[in-house]
Image (cartoon, helix red, strand yellow):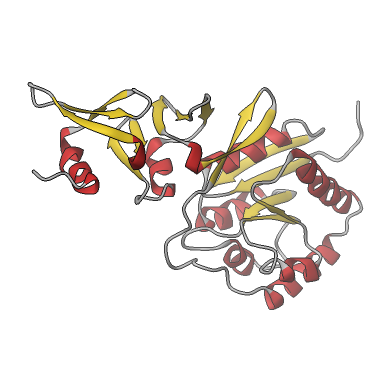
Amino acid sequence: MSDRKRIRALIVDDEPLARQRIEDLLRHEEGVEVAGTADTGAAAVERIRALRPDIVFLDVQMPGKTGLDVVREVGPEQMPPTIFVTAFDQHALAAFELAALDYLVKPFDDERFEQAFRRARRAIELEEIGRLRGQMLALLGAAPPPPDTVGPQPYLERIAVEMRGKVRVVPVEQIQYVTSDGPYAELHTAERTHIIREAMQALEKRLDPARFFRIHRSAIVRLDQIETLLRGAGGDYEVVLKGGMRLPVSRSRREELERKLGVMS
């Protein structure tokens, strides 16, 4: 039986897949309990104060309150040790490096996660919380405001999927269509189908509408994969994709689909 300090973690990210990824990785860490999750900055502030976790995995870019806004509202002196999760490029990461706080750049691999978590665990076990809070204060003074936090969030260019215990990154440009299966979404490429834990509504918002369109509550298609739009005798519609797949089109979405395809009524 290990005598290591038990660590309670809070995971904050507006993307369900990202939260699930960190939660799955933490399951492999000894003596770690996921105390809770949050999908907004406001919920993060509330849960940090209520749950008092030992460590927080905090997304930097979120609609409304950003990760840095969360730190400001809770107060650096009250924040637990924090690993920031970000999609920033290397130039925007300069402030994090200067402040010596750890961070994970999406999409990160298992080894990078383990490295960041080991560093945080060591700081917690050595009770270096005062030093970490000083670094967080430095971060707030050095970090530039996250880009596009007021405007629309960037659309997905790649999606991390788990296969046989490993994580693979699927470029969005390879996805031909997406279908739903309960709480899961199935990403169909020319080679295979990948399953992720993601609601269709959430996924639809993260895909570029110039490239993808939700034709039915259970199907999203890449527009350049549509070969034919068929009108049935009963008023029902369906699309035929280049690979031969047929998918139904909701009547409520048919007119907008025709506009996107340039079909004259």
Q: Nearer the viewer, residue 155 or 144?
A: 155
Q: Quadrant of residue 26?
A: top right
Residue at 78% across, 46% down: 112
Q: Is residue 34 left or right of residue 170?
A: right
Residue sitting farthest toward the bottom: 141
Q: Nearer the viewer, residue 175 or 207?
A: 175
- Pick the quarter of the image with the N terminus: top right
Q: Is residue 210 left or right of residue 250?
A: right
Q: Is residue 218 left or right of residue 193?
A: left
Marker count (numbered): 0
Q: Is residue 250 left or right of residue 51?
A: left
Residue at 88% across, 55% down: 127
Residue at 57% across, 68% down: 146
Task: Locate residue 265, reporting x and y percent.
Answer: 8, 43
Residue at 43% across, 35% down: 199
Task: Locate residue 91, reporting x and y percent.
Answer: 69, 69
Q: Quadrant of residue 128?
A: bottom right
Compared to residue 126, the image places residue 66 above or below, namely: below
Task: Locate residue 83, reporting x and y percent.
Answer: 72, 54
Task: Locate residue 167, reporting x and y percent.
Answer: 66, 33
Compared to residue 8, the image places residue 229 above or below, namely: above
Q: Nearer the viewer, residue 55 or 240?
A: 240
